[in-house]
Image (cartoon, helix red, strand yellow):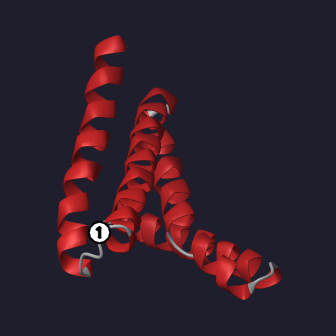
Amino acid sequence: MTEYVLRFIAGGVIVSAFAILGDMLRPKSFGGLLGAAPSVALATLGIAIVQHGPQYAAAESWTMIYGAAALACYSLAVCHLLMRFRLAALPATVLAFAVWLAVAFGLLASFRGAA
């Protein structure tokens, strides 16, 4: 129970800090990039360090990097399907999800095998 309270407080503080930073930046729409994902990732890594140690948190941070790379590939695939092939949004996102899965799990498998 205390873990959830700690996550709630740490997440709230970090989200608020990123929201303040986002308000100070121009253009205002850029602030949305700082709204949730970085703050939740930092809170999660902070809790992982406290509970499991820095080695565990390092492994968690690598999986976050793999997910971000997969998201970039997914986003490019969606844009390509929408603009070049003129697909509707739903089919484009469903097809591009396969790209996300392939990149994310491919990176995870290849780097786990190398470690």
Q: Is residue 39 above or below residue 16?
A: above
What percent of the width, then of the height, locates residue 112? 31, 21
What's the residue at 41%, 70% (across, down)?
5
**Percent of width and height locating residue 34:** 62, 71
Q: Residues within 10 Å of mark 1 (few under 14, many from 20)?
A: few
- In-image side of 96 versus 61 (left or right): left
Label 1 sits on what residue type? Phe
Q: Name the quadrant containing residue 111.
A: top left
- The answer to which image quadrant residue 87 occupies is bottom left
Q: Position of residue 82 (x, y in %)?
A: 34, 73
Q: Is residue 50 left or right of residue 25?
A: left
14 left or right of 61 in image: right
Residue at 59% over, 79% down: 32
Along the line of sight, which residue is nearer the eye, 44 or 62? 62
Residue where numbered disc 1 is placed: 85
Query: Which quarter shows the N terminus?
Result: bottom left
Question: Does residue 94 sit above or below 101 in this rendering?
Answer: below
Along the viewing direction, whichever of 81 and 44 lies nearer the viewer = 81
Left or right: residue 27 compared with residue 12? right
* Residue 114 x/y as whole percent: 35, 12
Q: Quadrant of the C terminus?
A: top left
Asked if residue 65 is positioned above or below residue 44 in the image, the reply reads above
Q: Residue at x 51, y 69 (%)?
A: 11
Q: Is residue 17 shown above or below 51?
A: below
Query: Does dot 1 land on a helix, a strand or a loop?
Result: loop
